[in-house]
Each structure stands twice: as structure tokens, then as C-alpha cells.
Amino acid sequence: MHGESELEPAVELARRHDEKVLVEEFVTGMEVECGVLGNRQPPPIASLPGRIDTLDHEWYDFSSKYDEDGMELIVPPELPQETIERVQQLSVDAFIASECEGMARIDCFVRDDGGVVVNELNTIPGFTATSVYAKLFEASGIPYPELLNRLIDLAVERHERRSKLEY
Ligand SMILES: Nc1ncnc2c1ncn2[C@@H]1O[C@H](COP(=O)(O)OP(=O)(O)O)[C@@H](O)[C@H]1O
Ligand SMILES: [Mg+2]
């Protein structure tokens, strides 16, 4: 949306798809995504964040996400170290607060003043070897085969822990 006149038709369009429509403030700034890996103990870890460059797309829409050459991932983003660490900390905090386990990809905006806004938490992020989640951990020193092993270990740990619960 670019102005108030587009609001009504946009809500009408959204209502064709669902009964619930969410209208949010537009957040300007850099779009960054961060992978989180872990269960409860030891505490989950964050990957390096990556910046989403939508190239010639106005925003990160369907074609930017899925077309060949629709986007580029820049890891790490061109941000001060303290902002990178803030994205990582907030991502881990959001993961824990939402009681996630195993994996999640936390999508954020970094405003021009350095403030970080969590946009979305993806509990089943795209998960091929070329997906953002895998690329983020690859750039953080955890290649895809090791990532798979760690996720399997986490799933087993969670299963063993929870199977001790009495029903
Ligand atoms: N409040 C917002 N301000 C600015 N851009 C937004 C906002 N919400 C979503 N977007 C843009 O739309 C894209 C898709 O929205 P998102 O909430 O991530 O849903 P999904 O990824 O499930 O389609 C985001 O990656 C971002 O580019
Ligand atoms: Mg998203």
C-alpha cells in the first residue's frame, strides 16, 4: 500500500481470503532474518543474521521469494556489531518466549535508528540446502549435514524428555 486510498480495496481483497484482517504500521528499514537452533537446555543459539535484498522487487513478495534471481541474501548484513548482536538476542528471546524447540527463523526489521522490530517467527522455515535457514547456518560455521545431525539430536532429546511426562 502507498496511501490511504488503497486501504479499503486492500481490506476488501484480504476479506475474500479470511474473516480476520490484520492492518499493521509500515516499518521502514532493513529486512533481516536470523536462524535459531536448540531446545531448552543448553540454550538455543542464533545464526548470523542475513539481509534480504529484493533486487528489482518493491518488497519481499511471492515472486521475490520464489523466482530465480528474485532475491539475494547478504550474510552478515552491513550493520554495526552491536545491532547484529541485538538481532541475535531478540531472535533467541522470541524463540524462547514462543516456546519453540528445534528450529525457527526469526524475521526482523532494523529501523534506521538501529531499533529492531521482530516481524515474524517461522516455526517451519523453508528447509532445503539452499533455503535461507540453511544458508545462515552455513555462513555461521554449521554446514547443512551437521545442521541435519543437530536437528535430529534435538528431536531425540525433546522426545526423550517429553516421554517421561505422566499423562
Ligand atoms: N509491517 C510491515 N512493514 C513493512 N513491510 C512489511 C510489513 N509486514 C510485512 N512486510 C513485508 O511483506 C513481506 C511478507 O510479510 P510477512 O509478514 O513476512 O509474511 P509471509 O512471509 O508469511 O508472507 C515481509 O517480508 C516484508 O517485506
Ligand atoms: Mg516472512
Image: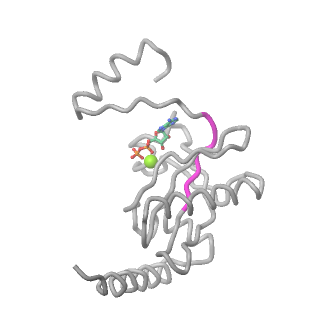
- Image location of residue 12, percent across then percent down: 28, 21
List the single residue furthest toward the front: 166
Name the residue located 37 percent from the left edge and 32 percent from the top edge.
Answer: 22
- Image location of residue 57, percent across then percent down: 50, 37
List the single residue furthest toward the top: 5
From the viewer's side, name the closer residue of 50 and 114. Answer: 114
From the viewer's side, name the closer residue of 43 and 102. Answer: 43
Name the residue located 29 percent from the left edge and 85 percent from the top edge.
Answer: 163
Q: Is residue 118 above or below residue 127?
A: above
The C terminus lies in quadrant: bottom left
- Image location of residue 140, percent across then percent down: 62, 72
From the viewer's side, name the closer residue of 118 and 135. Answer: 118
Name the residue located 53 percent from the left edge and 30 percent from the top edge.
Answer: 26
- Please indicate whether residue 140 sits to the left or right of residue 15 in the image: right
Read off the magenta span.
28-34
Name the image colouring. Answer: one colour
Q: Is residue 54 above or below residue 127?
A: above
In the figure, residue 164 lies in which quadrant?
Answer: bottom left
In the figure, residue 110 lies in which quadrant?
Answer: top right
From the viewer's side, name the closer residue of 165 and 27. Answer: 165
Q: Is residue 36 above or below residue 148?
A: above
- Please indicate whether residue 49 sits to the left or right of residue 123 in the image: right
Say if the magenta span includes residue 31.
Answer: yes
Q: How many marks?
A: 0
Name the residue located 63 percent from the left edge and 64 percent from the top edge.
Answer: 48
